[in-house]
Image (tube, rainbow, N blue to C red):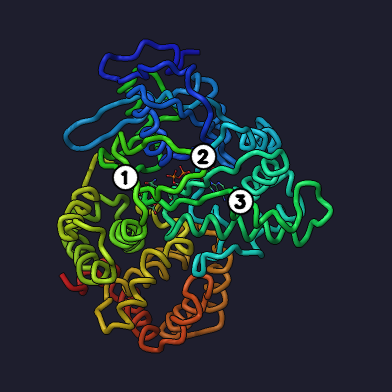
Amino acid sequence: MTTLASVSLPSHVARPTYDRTALKTKIVHLGFGAFHRAHQALYSHELAASKKSDWGICEVNLFTGKAPIEQLKQQELLYSVIEKSTEGATATVIGVVTEAMHPALDTPQAIIEKMAEAQVAIVSLTVTEKGYCCDPASGQLDQNNNLIQHDLLNPSEPKSAVGYIVQALALRRNRGLAGFSVLSCDNVQGNGQVAKAAVLGFAQQLSNSLRESPLVDSELADWIEKNVTFPSTMVDRIVPAMTEESFEEVQQHLTVSDPCAVLCEPFRQWVIEDNFVQGRPDWDQVGATFTQDVEPFEEMKLRLLNGSHSFLAYLGYLGGYQYISDTMHDQHYQQAVLQMMLVEQAPTLSLPDGVDVEAYAEQLIRRFSNTELKHKTGQIAMDGSQKLPQRFLNSLRHNMKNGLPYPCLVMGIAGWMHYVSGKDQSGNAIEIKDPMADIFANIFSSTFSNTCSEHLTNHDSVRALLSLEAIFGNDLALDETLFNQLTDAYQLIDTQGVRAAVATLPQ
Ligand code: NAI
Ligand code: CS2
C-alpha cells in the first residue's frame, strides 16, 4: 500500500529533517484529535527539527478514534498538517510521534504501563471539555458521571482519562517512581485546576471505596498532590473537523492520501504555566510562551474567541449559515459579534500586559472570515452544556452585577436554547451532540406536550433550561430580570426569525 511514509512527496511538502529514532517517548498524549495534531504535536515537531529536543509523543485515543491510531501505525507514525489562508497553503509532515495506542488495539493495561514508564514526564490531554467528567458550572468531579462510576468499580480497566491518569500514578507511586505533569490543552477555564480537581477527586473517591487494593490507600490523593503538577494553558488555533472535501485537498497537496491529516489556519498561540515536575520541552523556542499566570490569557481567549464562536455557531446555524466564514458575510452578525467582544466581554477581563483588545478583536474577525477554513457552525455548537459557563455566563454575571449591558450575551444564550430544542426554524431536526442531550429532549417533550399556547411554551422552555444548575449554577435562575430578557430574546427569534433578531442587536 502506498502511504505518506512510502511515497516520494512533492518538494514543497516539508518532511522531518531530524533523526526520529533519537526521540524518546517522554509525553503520553490522550486525545489524538484534529487540534492536537496541528498544535502541541506541531510545536514539538518544530522543536525536534531545531535539533534541540528529544521529546517524542505516544498518541492515545481512549474511545472514538481507533481508526486514526491504526492509520498512524500504518504510515510509520507520520501525518501531515496543512496551514491554509487566502494567501496560500503550506504542508508539513510531522515526525514527532513515537508510538500510538488505543485500548481496543493495545489493551488498557498497556496504556497504563506506558504512562507509568519512568521517562514519561508529561501526560497531556485534548479530550474535549466533557472528558474531565466535571460539573461544567463548578469545575468539580461529577460523581454521577457514568464513566467515573464505571472506573470507581473497575480502576484497573478504566474508561475515562481521569481513571487512566489515577491508575498510572498509583502504579508509579507503588514502584517508587516520580509523578508526571498533567497538561490540559482543552478550552476549559482554569484547565489545570479542573484537571487537578478531577484527578484528586477521583483518587479520593477510589481510596474511600477500595481500602484493600495494593495500589490504592488513603495516602494516594496526598501523594498525587505532592508529586504531580497540573499546569494551566491557553491554547489557540482553529482546526476544523476534516470532511471528504478536505481529505481530497490533502490528496492534491501530497499526491497521496493521508487519513490522519488536518487542515488549519496559519495563526497559533500557546501560553503555558511553567510548573512541571520532571522537566518540559522548550516549546518557547518555537513560539509558545511560558508564564506564571495563564488566567488572563485563558479568560481573554475563552470569552473573546470562543464566546464569539458559540454566538456565531448557534445563531449562525439557525440562520442557515453552514460555516463560520459565512456568518462573517452577514454584516449584522459581524457587527454584533464585534460589539459583544468589545462592549460585553472585554470589560469583564483583566487583560494580559501589552494586549490591545481592539486589535485582538479585529484579528479575530479576520480569522473568522478565512473562507479557506470550512469550520462548521454545527461543529462548534456541539457540547454547549460544557462550553456556556466559560464562554458566556461568567461575563453575564459580571455585567449583571456591575450594571453593564449584555444584550448580545442574552441573544447567544437564547440561540443556544433554541438550538437544543432539536429543531431548526423550518422544523427540521437537529442532532444534539451533548452529554446533557437526553435532559434537553425531556424538557422539550414535556413543555411541548403540557402547554397549549406558543407563548407559554417559550416561557416554560426558558425556565426549564435556565434551571439546569450544572450549566447555570444556582444563582442565574433566581434572577427574574434575566429570565424575562431571555424569554424576550427567545420569543423574538421565534416570531421574527433569527437573522432579524440578530439585526436588532447593537451594531
Ligand atoms: P476531535 O473531535 O478531533 O478530537 C476529540 C478527541 O477527544 C479525540 O481524540 C477523542 O478520542 C477524545 N475524546 C472525546 N471524548 C472523550 C472523553 N470523554 N474522554 C477521553 N477522550 C475523549 O476534536 P479536536 O478538534 O481535537 O478538539 C478537541 C478539544 O481540543 C476541544 O474540545 C477543545 O477543548 C480543544 N481545542 C480545539 C481547537 C480546535 O479548533 N479544534 C482549538 C483549541 C482547543
Ligand atoms: C471552537 C474551538 O469547537 C469549538 O468550540 O470554539 O475549538 C476553537 O476553534 C478553538 O478554541 C480555537 O482556538
Circle 2 sits in a helix, a strand or a loop, which is it?
loop
Q: What residue would you read off at disc 1? A: 289
Q: Earlier in the sequence, mark 1 or mark 3?
A: 3
| Mark 2: C-beta under 8 Å from nearest atom of ligand 1 | no
Decide: is 95 above or below 290: above
**Residue 308, can we see it?**
no
- Residue at horizontal 61 percent and vertical 51 percent from the top: 162
Above or below, 281 relative to 401: above
Q: Position of residue 373 (x, y in %)?
A: 28, 41
Give the left or right position of residue 48, taking residue 168 as reference.
left
Label 2, on which residue? 278
Instruction: Check contact, mark 1 vs mark 2: CB within 8 A.
Output: no
Residue 257 image-quadrant placement: top left
Q: CA distance from mark 1 to mark 2?
A: 19 Å
Left or right? Give the position of 98 relative to 222.
Answer: left
Q: Which is in the foreground here, disc 1 or disc 3?
A: 1
